[in-house]
Image (cartoon, rainbow, N blue to C red):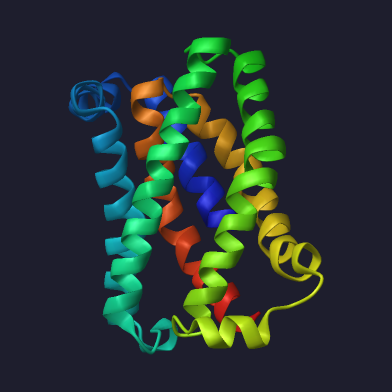
Amino acid sequence: MLVLQCIAVALAAAYCMLPHFRTWLEPVAEWHRNWGWKSAFLSQMFFCGMVPGALMLVFRSIRPRRLWLTVVAQSFWCGGFGVCCNGLFRILADLLGDDSEMSTVLMKAAFDQFVWTVAVIAPANAVFFFWLGRDFSFRRVRDEWPRPFYAKMVLPNLIPNWIVWIPVSMAVFSFPYALQIHINGFVCAFWTLMCIQIGRRT
């Protein structure tokens, strides 16, 4: 978790202090401006589906039973969520501004973590990764479904999510809107692996 936070903060610091780093990221921002939600889908599919899939292929200890089905399902799931999150980032930029002022960053991060994540991200991911952890079996999901759902399924994801993503979210929102979903995806590649392990062990 600390490594994820350090990566996000280092990226934000480099963007603020190193002009060459901003220049390197400009093609990514231009791609996003031209492709919109499609770039968000492809970015999240790559970072949160294919990159974790490659790591699971290399490291046997984190490899699921159905590796390729897991990678495909996870890629499309995360790509779809990338589109949703990109829409949220667009709305927040329109409502609160697209600057890196601390007040703007704090308001965006607060809404992202305490409204969007609580109501949408954490419950949906809990269900999806629980299903993955049951080898895509709806029968096993039905038979092993924990009750109460929110306490046993969502909180195990939500609490570590806050520990990691409150500072990471602040780093993400310090970037311009056109880069936010891609920086988010880069960091989220490793978070996805954690979610898979939580789903398997819950």
Looking at the image, how many numbered discs can be counted on the residues?
0
Residue 167 horizontal/vertical position (percent): 62, 39
Vertical placement of residue 169 versus 143, above or below = above
Between 163 and 45, the one nearer to me in the picture:
45
Above or below: residue 128 compared with residue 137:
above
The answer to which quarter of the image holds residue 63 is bottom left
Classify residue 110 as left or right of residue 177: right
Q: Nearer the viewer, residue 115 or 1?
A: 115
Considering depth in this image, is 9 or 152 the residue closer to the camera? 152
* Along the viewing direction, whichever of 13 and 198 lies nearer the viewer: 198
Looking at the rendering, in which quadrant would you find the N terminus? bottom right
Residue beneath the point at 43% across and 24% down: 175
Q: Quadrant of the C terminus?
A: bottom right
Q: Report which quarter residue 20 is drawn in.
A: top left
Q: Which residue is depicted at the point 46% across and 62% down?
A: 192
Q: Position of residue 147 (x, y in %)?
A: 79, 75
Residue at 52% x, 69% y is 129
**Please, is residue 98 above or below residue 112 in the view?**
above
> In the shown orientation, is residue 27 left or right of residue 171?
left
Above or below, comparing residue 79 to residue 142 in the picture: above
Residue 149 picture location, percent across and down = 75, 68
Name the quadrant containing residue 107. Answer: top right
